[in-house]
Amino acid sequence: MAFADTPPWLSRYESGKYQPVTFLERGVALPFTTPALLGGRIRPGRKAAELVLANPAGAEGVYILSWASLPDVCTPTLHDRALWGRVAQLAILTPGTVRQASRAVAAEGLAGRAAARAAAEAERQSRRARTITHYHLLVELVRQDDPGSSRAASQPWDPAVLEERARAALSRRRGSNSSAASAFEALAELAELFEACGLPDDPSQARMPQQAAEIQAVVQAMIRWSERATATERSCTRLLAECASLTQRCFQHAMTEAHALLADLSGLVERWQRGQDPIANIAARPEWLLDGWELICGLWRGAAEEQRATALLDMAALVPVVPREVGDWIGFDAAGAVVEHRSGLRQWRRMVQPNQDWTTGRILELVARNEAVRVQCA
Amino acid sequence: MSQALRELRELGQAAAAADDAALARVVAVLDRVPERGEADRVLDPVRPRLRTLRVPRPLGLPRLLFLPLDGVILPPARWTRGAAAVPRSALMVLAGAVQAALGAEGAAIAAACPRHTIQDDAAIAALGGRLWEPAARLLPEAPPPGWPGIGLNAGDYAGIAALCRPVWRAGPAIWAALSAAAEGPPEALARPALTAAAAGGAGPLTATLATLLLRATAPGLLAQLAAGLEPAARPVALAALDSILAAPPPPFAALDVRAAAEAARLTARRLEDLENCSLLTGEWQRRIQACRRVADEACRAAFLAATEQELVAPAQRLAAAPAVGDTEVAAMEEGARRLRVLEGAGRRLGNTQAYDRALRDLTASLRALGAQATNPEGLRPMDLARSLEILAGPEAAATLLPPGLLGGTEPAARR
C-alpha cells in the first residue's frame, strides 16, 4: 500500500509496482531446478550481479538480492549451484549468452541424463540453425545484388558457387577484396545474431517463431482447460492469456523491425562493421520479449491433468513484466497494460506451508518436475 | 493340528512374507470368495499391515455393518467372555441376522455395497446411514440360526449384541468422525460420536474409542475428550491409551518404502500428540518415550534395509555393467526419492544423528563406487552424485564430483 507522503521518485519501488525500465533491469530468466528459485532471473547490479526472485506467495512484486546470497536463500541443487557459478562469469548478459551457459551446465548431467541429452541436442539444433541462416543470408545477398537473376529462388545453391557470388557482391559494393573478406566474416556474425529470430518466412525454422507458436498453443490449451476450472484458475488463465497476447503483439512488431534490417544486406553489413550495438539491440528484442515464457509453457506441458491447477498458480506468478523501454519502440504503454492485467493477481494468494516439504517429499517432486521442464526448455 | 489348519497357518505366514503388491493380490483373491470361513484366518497375521497399507477392500454388508466396531474385532482365539469386543467368527452370523431382519432394504443395501470399497467415505456414509440405526433396532434378542456353529455359546450372544446395538446407533456420528480421523478427528465430530456411544455404557464407549483411535492422528486429544465426558469414562480413556502404548510399532520393514514413510509420519504425529496429552504424566510419559525409541529403531532398521535394496545394490550392479541406460539410472533416482521421504519421516521419530551417520556411510560407499565406475557407456560418477543429492542433499553429493565443476561466482556480470 502506498503512503500518502511517498515521494514520486520512490513510488515505482512500492510493493506491487515493480516496473523495470529496461529488459536488462528485468533480468534474464534462468532455468533453476530448486523450487524456491523457480523463475529466478539474473541482472547486473552496480557492483555485482543481482538475483531477482518472484514473490513465493504468488503475490505481486519481486525480491532483489545480491547474487552471492543465493545459497542463503535456499539450498540450491547441484545444477543450480553450477549455473549460479557459470552465469556469474558471463561478460555479457542476454537471453542468448545465458542459454548457452545453462546448456553447458545441463550437458554435464547435473539435471539428469535426459536434460543432458536435451541440452546436447539443442546445441546441435542451434549450430544447424546458424548454418541454415548463414546460407539464406548469402542467398539473399546474392539476390539483392542481382534482382534480375533468372535463377529460381527455390533452387539450391552449390555452397562454393554461393560463397563466390556473395564475395563478389560484397566486393562490388566496397571496391576492395580485403574489405570484402571482412564483410564476409561480418555476414557470418549476423547469421549468428539472427539464428534465434530467423529470417522472413522462417526458412530456418528458428527458435523464436517456434516459441511464439508454442505460447499461442499453450494459451489455447489453457483456455479450453479453464472452461471447467474454478474462478481463481480462470483468473490466472485470463492473466496469462492477456499478457501472452500483449507479448505476441510486441513480438510481432519486434520481428518485423528485425527482419526489416535484412532488406539491404550489404548496407546492413556495412553498418554492422561500423557499430554492432544498434543492430544487435534490434535483433535481440524478440528474444528478450519472450524470455521467461518458455518456462511458463514448460510448466503447463509438464503438468499432468491433475497437476494443472497447481501449475497454473506457478505460471501466473511468473508472468514476465514488460519493461517500459518497450513503449518507446512499440508506440503504446505495453508495460502499463501488463501491470493492469497483473493487478488480477491480488485476487488470489498461494498458501506457503512452512516446513512441510522436508517431511512430505513434495520438494523432491517439485525438483523432479523442474528437471523435466528443463528437458523441454533446453 | 489338522492338515487344513496347518495349511492355513502356512498360507498366513506366506502372506506375511509377501511384498505389498503381492499381499494386495492375495487379499483381492480372498475378497472374491463369497464365504471365506476358516480361510479368513490367512489374513490374521497381516491385518495391522493391511490397515497401514489401506488396501481398497470391497464393501459388503457385513464389512459395512461392523465398520463402527472396527477397533474391537478380534480373532476368536483372543476374544474373552465379557470383553468389549466382537469375535471375528460372529460377524457373518450377526450380519446375516441383520440383513434378514431388514428384509428388502437389507437386500438392497447388500446389492449396493459391492460397487464401492472401504475407501469410499461418502458411499459408506450413505449406505451406513441406512443400515446402522435399523440394525440396532432389529438385531434379534435371541441368538440367530448358525450361532452355535461358530464356537460361541448362547450366553455370549447377549453380551455381544448389547455391545453392538449402542455402537450402531451411534454409527453415523462415529463414521463422520472416522472420515475426518486424519485431522484429529476434530472435536466437533469426535464429541458427538463419543457422547452417543457413552450413552450405551462403558463397553460401547470403549469400542468407539478403540475404533476412532485406530486412525486418529491426535489420539491424546481424543482420549482427553472421552475422559471429560463423565467420571466413569476416564478409566475407559486411560485403558484405550494403555492399549495404544502396548501395541507394537507399525511393521515398517514389511511395508514398501512409501507406505513405511507414511506410517512413520503418522506414528510421529501420534506420539507428539500423546506427549502433549494432559492425561499422561509421569510413568505414562516414560512409556511414550519407550514407544518412540522402539518405533525409531524399527523405522531406522527399515530405512537401512531399504537403502541397501533401493540404492546400494542397484548402484553396485550398474557400476559393474558395461553399459547403463537412462531408464536404469532414472529407476535408481526414483529409489533415492522414496528413501528420502522415509528418512525425512523417520527423523521425526527421534534419533536424527543415526540418520546422519547412515548417510555419511552411504556417501563414502557411493564415492568408492564412483571411483570404480569407469566404463564410458556405463554408470557415471554424476549418476551416483545425483542419487546421493536426492537422498542426502547437494553438500554430500558435491563430494562425488570433480573439483571445479560447480564453479565460482566472480566476476560480476554486466551487459
Image (cartoon, coloured by chain):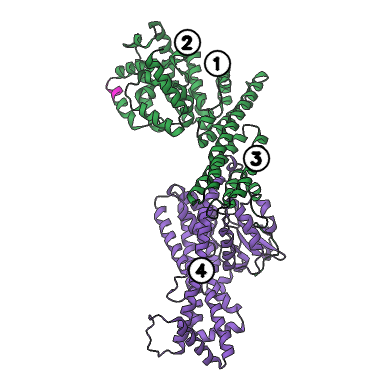
Closer-to-camera residue (B127/A129): A129
Name the residue carrying label 2: B80
Q: Provide the chain ID for the residue under circle 3.
A: B
Q: Which residue is mark 1?
A: B236
- For the residues labelled 2 and 1, the Cα–Cα distance comes to 18 Å
Q: Label 2: how many residues lie within 10 Å, few (<14), some (14-19) or many (20+)?
A: few
- Where A373 falls versus B228 (above or below)? below
Q: Which residue shows up at 46% across the image and 60% down it?
A: A241
Which quadrant of the rendered structure holds the N terminus of chain B?
Answer: top left
Marks 3 and 2 share the same chain: yes
Query: For the stretch drawn in magenta, what is the main secondary structure?
Result: helix
Q: Residue furthest left?
A: B104
Looking at the rendering, the stretch of residues picked out in magenta corresponds to B103-107
**Labels 2, 4: front one:** 4
Q: Nearer the viewer, mark 1 or mark 4?
A: 4
Instruction: Give the label on residue A126, or none.
Output: 4
Few, some or many residues within 10 Å of mark 4 (<14, 14–19, 20+): some
Q: Which residue is mark 3?
A: B361
Kind of residue indicated by mark 1: Val
Q: Is residue A33 left or right of residue A142?
A: right
Measured in 3D between alpha carbons, the distance from the residue under mark 2 to the one under mark 4, in whole angstroms, is 78 Å
Quarter-of-image position of residue B136: top left
